[in-house]
Image (cartoon, coloured by chain):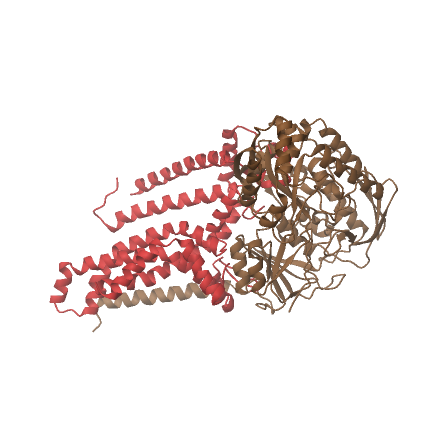
């Protein structure tokens, strides 16, 4: 006999099972697979780990390396960089010529190039890109949004600040003429940088690419930059699976150059460096950027390829002349330089391939001067110079950053420790101040709160202006050279050299300037040029390391 | 009851308001801030000034707070500057919430699946090697830091043995259809079995790491509760009535012992977010925990503001539900 309680329980169970089944079936009915026939295939996919999420995929509005890494595979510029070097070479422009005054540039474009959406790449597209950059309005004109334009071209069409750009004219389908307001050493190299990549005018118009808005404490970018980036490169954008930290690009079959062998190129965001290493070791990814130099040997022993780049950066000990009057004395700055054992620092703290710097630009950049004044490690001379300057009791606030590693500065804590020891050995009293990189360090440096600070720069292109111009061309810089009697003069000299159209004459001017900077001004103390590396599995072929850290995955294959 | 609930909800509103005020002020007192986060190392004094003015950060803090509150009420918490730069903070939360929920669910399932039976067995065989092993194991579970265990599990099972994936939620090459944001469920619903299996594999190690503390607590509470119940008069009565052991265990021992265990499971579920911060970071699991960790590292104030406010709301709401449930479960509890 079945009692009523058991019957009720049975009925409830039956109802529950029935209801669950009905819900599951109805959900499954509304949730059809959206896969194509190729779903789930992984063959021909190269997975490279990224350290962070890209800001967006429209490189014009970006300044972060993670955006540029993806953008370089989707987009191309009028000019490019010869693989493995920082030397400019033709890209979407087959060749170019310029007027004697360096203000008029004629670009002869490659034939038969199409954007990923089928739009023709021609002179009209080139001018639409230039006009787009120049005609930014509202939030688009902010340096936080269009940083590379502001840094390199200056102002916009609103005329609030002078602009390097004047106009772009379509001469014929495959010839575009760009007029500048002044000659600059950065042209045409800067057109090879990711922010100045050519983007499809059709896609930009369709997806409202310029509609940047202020949103709370930040900016909101339009759908174009998040979902529809459209260039001419060997890969086209497929999807950005934010829930899974995956950016997927696929081969562009109508690419105008040699088509890539890979079916897919996947960037997987893994913010933690140890996690990236373990993913590589477990075989889940094929490579990642900037492995910790202390892991290089172990990774190589484990059969991975550690690919070192040519050093194209500068690490320096910055000096702020704003608050500490003793630092305005050249003898004191020279004394500090003699106190530093840079040879030892490079050997003990920096990865293999790093070099001692003698000036603010690497050896491969035009304008490098081998005969600048040298400052050997000489603690006695340092003490003597300090005494002569009446600064034997020198006290400095020495800032160093925490929570960061940079290609030129792999371990700030240890580097700071070594430099501090050197300075204290000659009697300098060091007040150590540490702040998180994103938590006030850069802000304090910019506000002149440090007397000494650690910082550096990775070059964007092979022009001396990209190094010393960036540091000192604006007299209100991080070194506060504006308080020095020569601050304005240095700025003016840098601007003159940058606008000299004759290449040979310009190179000579920069050589002279480098001499002067290192002997007469010494606004900061160049320490080293480091060689950052990439690591990939042994079956990755064709990856050419770029000194600009701008590797292209088009020619890469697996196996 | 209704008045009580309304009063508690109004209190919740007050708590959130005060918290948002404190949070807003505190984040702005921290060095760095959105201007540094947006401009990075290429910043100049001029660009800082321009951006500060454009974002309205030069206005008095109460004006800024008023604007923030106005925007927040319409669901606009600003855009991320570090976790997922450029994305709306709310979008970051909504994208990552299913990941943390899925991970927490699997962790709590693991803790319950192993904690209750083992706790019960340990109590039934008190003083045996099984009991001692269980007690020591649960002590270790509580004592070993989650991040250490996570590293250990990852190193052994992912790096050395290669049995399970080392990080993430799903293998990059898998072209999975998204429906709910819960990857395993999505794979089942869309019958993309390989995607579901792959997502499940990705959950195993982080869920194991995250489950250790809840497992240890559930084990110990179950063991203690069962021991208490075994000494009760009604168990002896049931035995003297001649009921079979399985019936006594199921109807009398386990059922009565489950009351404190269920309460504990509820509390442990609420506490999982703290463990998720470390676990998700180690396994690069893109959930709220990872967002919090990266948010602090990169000073992503819009995301931090939203996540901390939501976490506080969840905490207060869970407390409210627990209080209300007491009144429902136990008629002796009266609410005024």
Image coords of residue A264 (percent x, y)? 63, 63
In the depicted view, which residue is nearer to us: A428 or A230?
A428
Is A135 drawn above or below residue A3 in the view shown? above
Image coords of residue A24 (percent x, y)? 43, 64
- Furthest-right residue in view? A100
Q: Is residue A217 visible?
A: no
Image coords of residue B61 (percent x, y)? 51, 30
Q: Colour of chain B?
A: red
Image coords of residue B309 (percent x, y)? 44, 42
Location of the N terminus of chain B (image quadrant): top left
In the depicted view, which residue is nearer to us: B149 or A104?
B149
In the depicted view, which residue is nearer to us: B268 or A522?
A522
Left or right of A15? Residue A482 is: right
Location of the C terminus of chain B (image quadrant): top left
Q: Residue at x 45, y 64 (%)?
A: B156
Q: Residue at x 62, y 48 (%)?
A: A346
Q: Is residue A31 visible?
A: yes
Report the chain shown in brown: A
Left or right of B79? Residue A166 is: right
- Furthest-left residue in view? B240
């Amino acid at each position: 006999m079945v009692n009523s309680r058991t019957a009720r329980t049975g009925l409830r169970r039956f109802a529950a099972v029935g209801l669950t089944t009905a819900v599951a079936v109805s959900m499954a009915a509304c949730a059809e697979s959206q896969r194509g026939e190729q779903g789930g295939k992984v063959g021909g996919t190269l997975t490279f780990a990224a350290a962070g999420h890209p800001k967006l995929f429209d490189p014009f509005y970006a300044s972060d390396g993670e955006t540029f890494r993806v953008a370089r595979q989707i987009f191309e510029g009028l000019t490019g960089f010869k693989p493995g070097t920082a030397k400019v070479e033709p890209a979407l422009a087959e060749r170019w010529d310029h007027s004697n005054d360096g203000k008029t540039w004629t670009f002869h474009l490659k034939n038969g190039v199409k954007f990923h959406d089928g739009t023709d790449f021609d002179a009209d597209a080139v001018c639409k890109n230039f006009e787009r950059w120049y005609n930014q309005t509202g939030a688009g004109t902010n340096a936080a949004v269009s940083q590379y334009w502001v840094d390199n071209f200056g102002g916009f069409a609103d005329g609030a600040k002078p602009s390097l750009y004047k106009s772009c004219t379509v001469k014929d389908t495959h010839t575009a003429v760009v007029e500048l307001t002044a000659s600059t050493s950065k042209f045409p190299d800067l057109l090879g940088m990711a922010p100045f990549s050519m983007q499809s005018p059709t896609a930009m118009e369709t997806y409202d690419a310029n509609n940047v808005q202020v949103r709370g404490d930040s900016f909101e970018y339009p759908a174009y930059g998040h979902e529809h980036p459209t260039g001419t490169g060997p890969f086209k954008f497929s999807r950005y699976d934010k829930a899974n930290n995956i950016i997927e690009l696929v081969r562009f079959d109508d690419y105008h150059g040699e088509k890539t062998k890979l079916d897919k190129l996947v960037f997987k965001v893994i913010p933690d460096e140890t996690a990236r290493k373990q993913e590589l070791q477990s075989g889940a990814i094929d490579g990642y950027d900037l492995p910790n130099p202390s892991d290089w040997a172990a990774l190589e022993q484990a059969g991975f390829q550690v690919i070192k780049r040519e050093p194209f950066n500068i690490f320096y000990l910055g000096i702020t002349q704003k608050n500490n009057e003793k630092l305005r004395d050249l003898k004191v700055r020279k004394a500090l330089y003699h106190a530093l054992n840079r040879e030892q620092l490079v050997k003990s703290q920096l990865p293999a391939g790093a070099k001692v710097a003698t000036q603010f630009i690497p050896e491969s950049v035009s304008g490098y001067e081998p005969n600048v004044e040298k400052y050997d490690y000489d603690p006695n001379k340092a003490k003597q110079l300090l005494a002569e300057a009446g600064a034997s009791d020198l006290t400095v606030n020495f800032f160093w950053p925490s929570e960061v590693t940079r290609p030129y500065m792999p371990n700030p804590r240890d580097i700071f420790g070594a430099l501090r020891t050197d300075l204290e050995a000659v009697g300098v009293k060091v007040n150590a101040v540490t702040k998180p990189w994103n938590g006030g360090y850069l802000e304090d440096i910019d506000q002149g709160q440090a007397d000494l600070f650690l910082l550096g720069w990775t070059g964007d292109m092979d022009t001396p202006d990209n190094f010393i111009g960036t540091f000192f061309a604006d007299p209100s810089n991080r070194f506060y050279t504006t308080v020095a009697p020569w601050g304005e003069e240095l700025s003016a000299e840098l601007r003159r050299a940058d606008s000299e159209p004759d290449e040979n004459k310009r190179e000579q001017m920069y050589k002279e300037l480098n001499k002067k900077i290192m002997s007469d001004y010494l606004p900061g103390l160049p320490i080293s040029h480091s060689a950052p590396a990439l690591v990939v599995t042994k079956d990755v072929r064709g990856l050419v390391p770029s000194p600009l850290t701008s590797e292209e995955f088009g020619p890469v294959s697996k196996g | 009851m209704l008045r009580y609930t309304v009063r508690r909800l109004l209190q919740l509103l007050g708590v959130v308001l005060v918290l948002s005020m404190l949070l807003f002020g505190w984040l702005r007192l921290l060095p760095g801030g959105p201007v540094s986060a947006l401009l990075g190392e290429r910043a100049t004094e001029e660009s800082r000034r321009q951006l500060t003015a454009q974002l309205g950060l030069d206005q008095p803090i109460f004006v800024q707070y008023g604007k923030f509150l106005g925007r927040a009420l319409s669901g606009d918490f600003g855009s991320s500057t570090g976790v997922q730069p450029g994305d709306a903070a709310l979008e970051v939360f909504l994208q990552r919430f299913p990941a943390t929920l899925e991970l927490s669910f699997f962790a709590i399932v693991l803790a319950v699946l192993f904690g209750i039976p083992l706790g019960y067995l340990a109590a039934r065989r008190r003083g045996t090697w099984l009991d001692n092993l269980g007690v020591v194991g649960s002590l270790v579970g509580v004592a070993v830091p989650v991040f250490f265990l996570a590293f250990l599990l990852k190193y052994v099972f992912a790096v050395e043995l290669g049995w399970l994936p080392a990080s993430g939620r799903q293998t990059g090459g898998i072209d999975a259809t998204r429906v709910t944001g819960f990857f395993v469920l999505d794979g089942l619903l869309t019958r993309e079995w390989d995607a579901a299996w792959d997502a499940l594999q990705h959950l195993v190690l982080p869920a194991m790491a995250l489950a250790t503390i809840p497992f240890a607590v559930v084990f110990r509470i179950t063991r203690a509760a069962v021991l208490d119940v075994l000494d009760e008069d009604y168990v002896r009565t049931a035995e003297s009535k001649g009921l079979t052991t399985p019936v006594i265990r199921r109807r009398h021992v386990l059922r009565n012992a489950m009351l404190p265990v269920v309460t504990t499971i509820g509390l442990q579920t609420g506490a999982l977010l703290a463990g998720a911060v470390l676990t998700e970071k180690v396994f690069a699991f893109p959930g709220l925990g990872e967002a919090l960790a990266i948010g602090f590292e990169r000073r992503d104030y819009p995301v931090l503001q939203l996540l901390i406010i939501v976490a506080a709301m969840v905490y207060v709401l869970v407390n409210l539900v627990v209080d209300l449930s007491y009144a429902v479960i136990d008629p002796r509890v009266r609410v005024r």
